[in-house]
Amino acid sequence: MLIALFTILLLGGSSTALLEYIADTRDSVKTVMAKDERQKEALNTLKAMKKRTNARNKHVKRASKDLAKAFVDHDAAVEQTDAVWDGYFAEIGRYNHDMLDLRYELKEHINREEWEAIFSVD
Amino acid sequence: MSIRACLFATTALALVLAGCGGKDVVLPVDVENEAFEDLRSEIREAIDDPARETEAIALVDNLADELRALRDKISARKTRAKELNANYDTSRADFDAFFEQVNSEIRSNQQRVTKNHRALLAITTPEEWSQIAKARSKAMSAAIKSVQTI
């Protein structure tokens, strides 16, 4: 259990996928937007976000596994965990960048009123 | 409101209140406390030397603080991300600044946790480490799952 604890503390839990939830708004998009070409484009962008998040999740799983493996070994070189973490952190940067690209691509298909109806935080 | 509607509303309210204050409700903080108590017990069992045991338990106390802080940080970061996204006019620079701040927090968190990990390795023998690492706790699994699902 100590290993799992170290792993989650080091990887930061779900706080490294902060725009992931946008991909889960397909139903709202279908409800709010008229069924036309713009809606189709918006849904395609959400699909791309989901795909990017799935790839990121695979990376996280791999990093968790590698970290756990390194943590189990008392004599493992500390550089071993550092290398896993560095790779993971680089992926967070790429993921955030890609998700932001997709977020702005999504905005091109949705007008202000629709956006507010889909993403209202109230 | 009819008598029947009034009766229904009163019953529904009573059920909601019973649910909120019921003894079956387990708060994440209680699960975490139990998880770390399990971990302390395991350390007491694995390490015979009192001085090293005390040191190891102090390090575990740090980890408990880290998990609590992580829970709060995740909630705050998610709320802020939703606020930024909800605003149609949020600029890319605003998002970049937010991610930069989050990344910097994650990096300093990584340094603290790594320091803690190394300190624990330094004061335990391979056998003690193996015993602590192999131990399973339902509470710890639940605490970790709970943080993962925020």
Image (tube, helix red, strand yellow):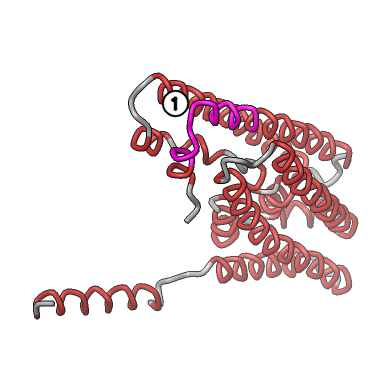
User: Does the magenta-highlighted stretch encompass residue A101?
Assistant: yes
Q: Residue at x 13, y 74 (%)?
A: B5
Residue A76, position in %: x, y? 85, 40
Residue A105: say if magenta.
yes
Residue position marked by numbered label 1 in the rendering: A43
Q: Main secondary structure of the magenta part?
A: helix
Residue B73 location in percent, x, y?
68, 57
Q: Residue at x 64, y 42 (%)?
A: B90
| Whole-percent x, y for residue A87 in the image | 78, 32
Residue B20's place in the image compared with B96, above or below, is: below
Q: Nearer the viewer, residue B27 or A74?
A: B27
Q: Image quadrant of residue A37?
A: top left
Q: Is residue B55 above or below residue A111?
A: below
Q: Write the residue at 74% across / 70% down.
A: B44
Identify residue type, mark 1: Leu
Circle 1 sits in a helix, a strand or a loop, which is it? helix
Q: Is residue A78 above or below residue B24?
A: above
Above-or-below relation of B53 to A116: below
State which region is magenta: A100-115
